[in-house]
Amino acid sequence: MGRKDFFMTAKANLIMTNDIQVTAREIDFVTRFERNWEHLREILGIMRPIKKTPGAVLKSKYAEGTLQNGNVGEGEEIPYSKFVVKEKPYAEMTIEKYAKAVSIEAIKDHGYENAVQMTDDEFLFQLQTNVTERFYNYLKTGTLSFTETTFQMALAMAKGRVENKFKQMHRNVTGVVGFVNILDVYEYIGAAEISIQNQFGFQYVKDFLGFKTIFLLSDSEIPRGTVIATPVENIVLYYVDPNESDFARAGLIYTVSGETNLIGFHTQGNYHTAVSESFAIMGLTLFAEYIDAVAVGTINTTQTLGTLTVNSAAGSKSGDTKVTVTPTKASAGNVYKYKVASSETTVDYGQNVKNWSAWDGESDITATTGQVITVVECDSTYKALSAGHATVTAKS
């Protein structure tokens, strides 16, 4: 046996110990990430993530229309109330790219296992937070806005409003998910014992005040005094498969996991900079399909009746008046009610004005010159929010 036989190089494509360690690390990372999201999906009640292609545009939906006056005389034709579902672009599905590196100094100071595990954990957490924070910010734009004086009432009304909205849309609600500031919850419960679950970075309470799940968020995610709710059926998770992105076609191979490939992960050593590099790509969007089925409540313990400026001018027909109101409605879900009398009608904040006459904000109103019309802006439960009055000027 010659001397050179002792120094024969390994065969090509032999799987080395380092290869196994790197692959195991990549698999561990993507598995942990997808396990976290699978758990969140179950908490939120999402049936199944929906795959989209890169470039697909997500659109939020909202219903628009006016409920016609139901005071129809005998034999008169009943007017149709027309409601349409409209869409507006929200976000384009894209593959996002992330990278992090562990220096040789960090490995020297902490050891390979500690340095890599610490940075991998933080990397995973930041990637997860990136998606959830965008979702929380989107929820804050919900159009079912309202104000209540207590935390419990705000939660109750948020739940009631979204259930009522889905009922109007002829859609079933199997559960409602809430999002609140954790300090508001602790202030409300005081010394009471509740079971707060903390898993995979998510803090939540199950079956609390009629909600299927309530997520407890920090000040940076949701401000104190704010309550958000939406039906579980309104929440979807869209994703782009990293294996089907342009990066894969370009020869950039990432480790993925499972049937639903939510993230791709790759790690390698860089001899030029003496660091251990990690790269992640993903395209995740957590989304509420109907933005007008997201209730955003504000807790205000010192509420007062707002002021409307009401003007009356001669209408288009004899005996009618043209009424204008400023400012415009504070929320698209609010409605106008009015009452005509010999003098101004007194209104208190929160007063129920359901039995007052409905007004669409545009149509002429039949009234007599010299009478006083009081107009109220109320929420969908007919709670008075603002009011104003004017002396009627009708067309003679």
Image (tube, rainbow, N blue to C red):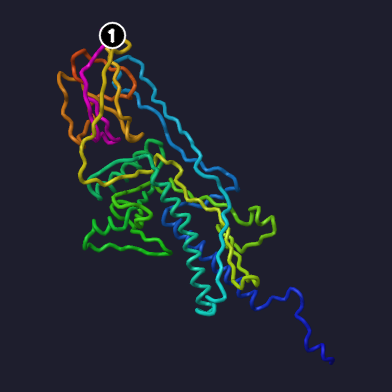
Q: Which quadrant is the C terminus positioned in?
A: top left
Q: Between residues 17 and 42, which one lies in front from this camera angle?
A: 17
Does 241 sit left or right of 250 as displayed?
left
Label 1 SS? loop
Graded by Cα atoms within 10 Å as few (under 14), some (14 to 19) or many (20 or more), the crowding at tag 1 reads few
| Magenta stretch holds residue 377 | yes
Q: Between residues 40 and 59, which one lies in front from this camera angle?
A: 59
* Quarter of the image where one finds residue 308: top left
In the picture as drawn, the residue positioned furthest to the top comes out as 396
| Magenta stretch holds residue 265 | no
Q: Residue at x 44, y 50 (%)?
A: 135
Q: Amino acid at mark 1?
A: Ser
Q: Residue at x 34, y 39 (%)?
A: 164
Query: Which residues are drawn in magenta?
Result: 373-396
The residue that mark 1 highlights is 318
Compared to residue 280, the image places residue 245 above or below, namely above
Compared to residue 315, the image places residue 86 above or below, namely below
